Amino acid sequence: MEERELVIIGGGPAGYVAAIRAAQLGGRATVVEMETLGGTCLNRGCVPSKTLLHSAELYGIMKKSEQFGIMARDVSADLAKMQARKNTVIKTHVSGVESLLKGNKIEVVKGRARLLPSKQVEIESGDGQKQVIQAQKIILATGGKPISLPIPGADSPSGIINAEKILNLESVPKSMIMIGGGVIGIEMATILAKLGCQVSVVEMLPHILPLEDAELTSVLAKALKDDGMQLYEGTRVLQIEDSAGGKSVTISDGKPEQKLEAEVVAIAVGYRPSTDGLGLEEAGVKINKGAIQVNERMETSVPGIYAAGDATGGIMLAYVAMEEGIIAAENAMGRRATIDYQVVPRFTHSLLELASVGLTEEEAKSQGYEIKIGRFPFAANSIATILGERRGLIKIITESKYGQILGVHILGPRATELIAEATLAMKMEATVADIVATLHAHPSLSEAMHEAALDVTGETIHYPSKNR
């Protein structure tokens, strides 16, 4: 039986990053991947969705280019060419991952892996051949897969699509009902809405993006509605049926039931750990509701077997998976590293970008904090005006006595880039006074962060503060 020092099952963000970190520490890593390196994020999630979103955003800008002094006639969207570019982007970065692994002398084995007792790994290749290797250490990084809903009609063979199918559509449907108003649902709905599809979003919880601050999601909801999207918040889907126009969805918000009609129905309500058939029970690895249980060192119930990424059922974000992979690899290589989830940024790319870190206003109040809040609208920011997108705001939530930053929430242009300053500030335990004392370039979107910090004490310069 062949032996390996470290076997990593899964070549997504957690897996390939863990392999690289192990190699940096002098380890010999073997990555087992049954599909394409890069995992869901690179092949079926983050990267392709943002690529199509960018194309859709450019299309939207070109349709209103006259306001920028550019006269463009007969602007149209070619979905086939958008998809071709998306595929090129994916291929480029998959090749990049392959090169990184090769450059770090990491062995890549194609096949489906399953755990056996005593840290043995069985690998079945595509041609049905099997081999068993003995591992000194193992990292499980098998990712996640879309959640299915127990709704009558949701398993229909026609007219039902998920996020991955949206990313590979050959044509834009005339209308779509999106079940799920979370990050994935809103991003997918935005892509199609920008390309001319009439979109309705049904979210069971009281507001879209339910993990985000309710004040900002209400502003985003209004913007989406103003741009033609229909939102049904606090609404349950009872049934999906075939109809003359495609699909009919019965919904209820506590009032009399109503039916929505559309060409297709999309279901995007998140991901669950992909651990089926992995042999966890046989190997003695404990799971909880399908998720691999790990400690702060990313170690499972079996010494020497670690897990990272979506398979652990924690915060299902690619950059969190990467950090978990690094922690798992360092511990597998003999170091003592622990994971810190205290400051994790979140983001959603929609009609307006929404990014956040830390507590929402509702969470801060429920945890007993006495808070002060600073706000600054992008309507008063010069770069936002130049970009032609003045909607949205920055909201800073602080603890009132010491000025500790509890949470920062940004809705507006390039919010995902802007949240990095807030994330670093919270990681370094900076206060709003520290942000106020930091010079921000002018003109820039980042000035809005400075002004929001000033607003905590009612001292905004470029907008009349309500906190005075």
Image (cartoon, rainbow, N blue to C red):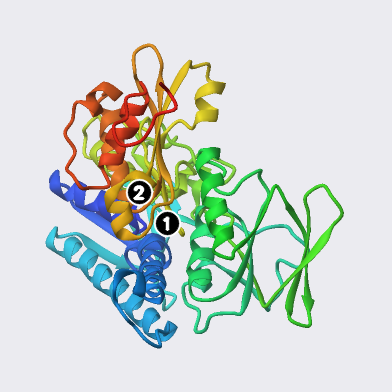
In the depicted structure, whether residue 409 falls above or below residue 246: above
Relative image position of residue 294 (x, y in whole percent): 43, 36
Q: Which of 122 and 230 is in front in this view?
A: 230
- Mark 2 residue type: Ala
Quarter of image, res 111: bottom left
Q: Looking at the image, can residue 1 be seen?
A: no
Identify the image quadrant of the C terminus. Answer: top left
In the depicted structure, whether residue 29 falls above or below residue 343: below
Disc 2 on helix, strand or loop? Answer: helix
Side of 442 relative to 54 (left or right) = left
Residue 448: assigned label = none
Q: Residues within 10 Å of mark 1 (few under 14, many from 20)?
A: many
Identify the image quadrant of the N terminus. Answer: bottom left
Residue extending farthest to the bottom is 74
Indicate which disc, 1 or 2, sits on the residue closer to the N terminus. 1
The residue under label 2 is 415
Relative image position of residue 41 (x, y in whole percent): 38, 60
Q: How crowded is mark 2: few (under 14 residues within 10 Å), some or many (20 or more)?
A: many
Relative image position of residue 436 (x, y in whole percent): 24, 27
In the depicted structure, whether residue 246 falls above or below residue 445: below
- Give the Cα distance between marks 1 and 2: 9 Å
Q: Looking at the image, can residue 447 be seen?
A: yes
Q: Which of 309 and 446 is in front in this view?
A: 446
The residue under label 1 is 349
